[in-house]
Image (cartoon, rainbow, N blue to C red):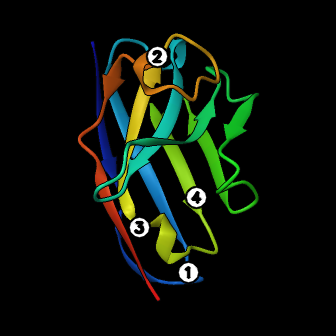
Amino acid sequence: QVQLVESGGGLVQAGGSLRLSCAASGRTFSSYCMGWFRQAPGKEREFVAAISWSGGSTYYADSVKGRFTISRDNAKNTLYLQMNSLKPDDTAVYYCAASLIQGSAISRAYDYWGQGTQVTVSS
């Protein structure tokens, strides 16, 4: 079992920045590849970014490439998502998730999920 708890969400103006964190406990965090997904009201959950177990490989959705950066600190059992140049379309609940499959953009590939943190970007 891996327990995941997101934090860092909030309200920000368009063009602003936020950094999300995902604290992991339970089984060895560094054994898992990690991902961020988001879900806006009335829409399906969508892939945002993923990172390999070592942090050496990262993957991004086209909609966030160049604006968001995923990273991890295995010594602190923590995953991060730095979000810059935020847009109103980025408004969603953001979830972190753990998978044994590297770089997957498919939610069913992820075995463990956090409860989500709300990000709201005002225009």
Mark 2 or mark 4: which is in front? 2
User: In this figure, which residue is indicated by the disc labeled 1?
Assistant: 16
Picture coordinates of residue 85 (x, y %)?
64, 75
Is 94 on the left-hand or right-hand side of 1?
Answer: right
Q: Name the amino acid type tagged 1.
A: Gly
Mark positioned earlier in the residue sequence (3 or 2): 3
Picture coordinates of residue 31 (x, y %)?
52, 12
C-alpha span from label 2 to label 4: 23 Å
C-alpha span from label 3 to label 1: 12 Å
C-alpha span from label 1 to label 4: 11 Å
Where disc 2 sits, the SS reads helix
Mark 2 or mark 1: which is in front? 2
**Residue 83, relative to residue 52: is it above or below?**
below
Image point (47%, 42%), residue name = 46
Q: Which residue in the rendered view is the most extreme toward the front?
A: 42
User: In this figure, which residue is indicated by the disc labeled 4?
Assistant: 82
Mark 2: few, some, or many residues within 10 Å (few <14, many ≥20)?
some
User: In this figure, which residue is indicated by the disc labeled 2?
Assistant: 109
Picture coordinates of residue 104 (x, y %)?
59, 23
